[in-house]
Amino acid sequence: MRLLSYETSEGPRLGRLRGERIEPLARSLAAIGLSPDADLRAVLDAGPDAWRRLAASTWGSDDALPLADAVLRPPFVPSAIICGGANFHDHLDETHRERPTHVEYFLKSPTGVIGPRDPVRMDPRLSSKYDYEVELAVVIGTRARHVSREDALGHVFGYTIINDVSIRDQQVIPWDPGRFQLRFGEGKSYLDSAPFGPWVVTADELTDVSRLALRTRVDGILRQSNSMANIFWDVPALISYYSSFMSLDPGVVIACGTPGGPALGSDVQLGADPYRRSDGVQRGDYVRPGQLVECEIESIGMLANRYLVD
């Protein structure tokens, strides 16, 4: 299934995407004992049996509406967003960082979540260096605590896209010559810092994410391009690692890290080495007001957001 949230006259509602049309799921939700206005978090909490019954339902096919006419909301608001950075060689190379010995671990506030097509509101009082980072987002469906790598994927409900919007002049602070202080709180969690969506693809439909292509375009210009095949710590490794520190409950989202190509990788003032690439990726500056950022992951879709001055 591809599950999404969209606006109606009665507020956001859960729908299922089939082709280019959205099937309302209100009657299907009622048939499995949930409120007709239940969101995806409620479906996650209801457990695997409810997911299977929802997938088998046929209610709503006669009431489908065109995707192009819908106003999409975030698929849901995660209870927590756990981020793994420093997970691609090309991103480390361009920022002069060595591969860490352990998974990078920081949290991003769910209050920064916005939906597909929502504007990223840029606050010039906060930053002049708004960036982008396409990342695979893993949606946890069943509680995971101290799980092995071999059992980790059994706890996944599905996958979507997150743009880890980062404000680099808050994240990377020049210290002594050639040395920098990294601040993952100020640089990662603020208003509109987590565009999320456009829908969640369930794990039964997307059974192998290990080689998915990731791309970002800014006003149509390719700025990021890589594959999950080149990640250091894959999805099972991330789930296993994070579950040793905290309980990964239904509704937790893990962001898997971004490949090279963000504007940070071209910012020599912040220690970057903007080496030339031969794969079509073009180096560029930070996002300017009015520019459209499109984060795309193979077999999932595209998350598009325009950056605008608030």
Image (cartoon, helix red, strand yellow):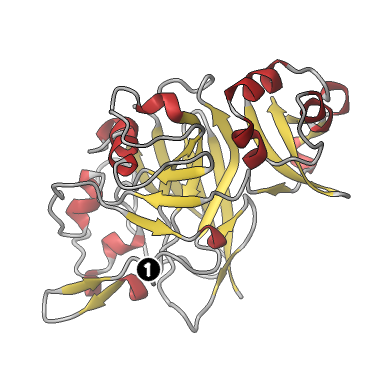
Q: Which quadrant does the N terminus fall into?
A: top right
Instruction: Pinpoint residue 8: horizontal percent, then vertical percent.
Output: 84, 46
Residue type marked 1 = Gly
- Report which quarter residue 39 is drawn in: top right
Residue 275 visible in the picture: no
Q: Is residue 137 above or below residue 147?
A: below
Observer-nearest residue: 95 or 282? 95
Instruction: Pinpoint residue 184: horizontal percent, then vertical percent.
Output: 33, 65
Query: Which residue shows up at 56% across the image and 62% down it?
Result: 111
Observer-nearest residue: 107 or 219? 107
Q: Is residue 188 left or right of residue 150?
A: right
Disc 1 crowd, CA 10 A, few/some/many (<14, 14-19, 20+): some
- Report which quarter residue 241 is drawn in: top left
Residue position marked by numbered label 1 in the rendering: 185
Residue 244 visible in the picture: yes
Q: Which quadrant does the C terminus fall into?
A: bottom right
Observer-nearest residue: 171 or 68? 171
Instruction: Pinpoint residue 62: horizontal percent, then vertical percent.
Output: 88, 22
Instruction: Pinpoint residue 51: horizontal percent, then vertical percent.
Output: 63, 24
Query: How many tags in the picture?
Result: 1
Find numbered disc 1 in the image and state the secondary structure of the residue it sits on.
Answer: loop
Query: Which residue shows up at 15% across the image and 50% down it?
Result: 100
Q: Is residue 79 left or right of residue 152?
A: right
Query: Which residue shows up at 59% across the image and 60% down it?
Result: 306
Query: Which residue shows up at 66% across the image and 24% down it?
Result: 50
Query: Quick one: which residue is furthest to the bottom in this view?
Result: 125
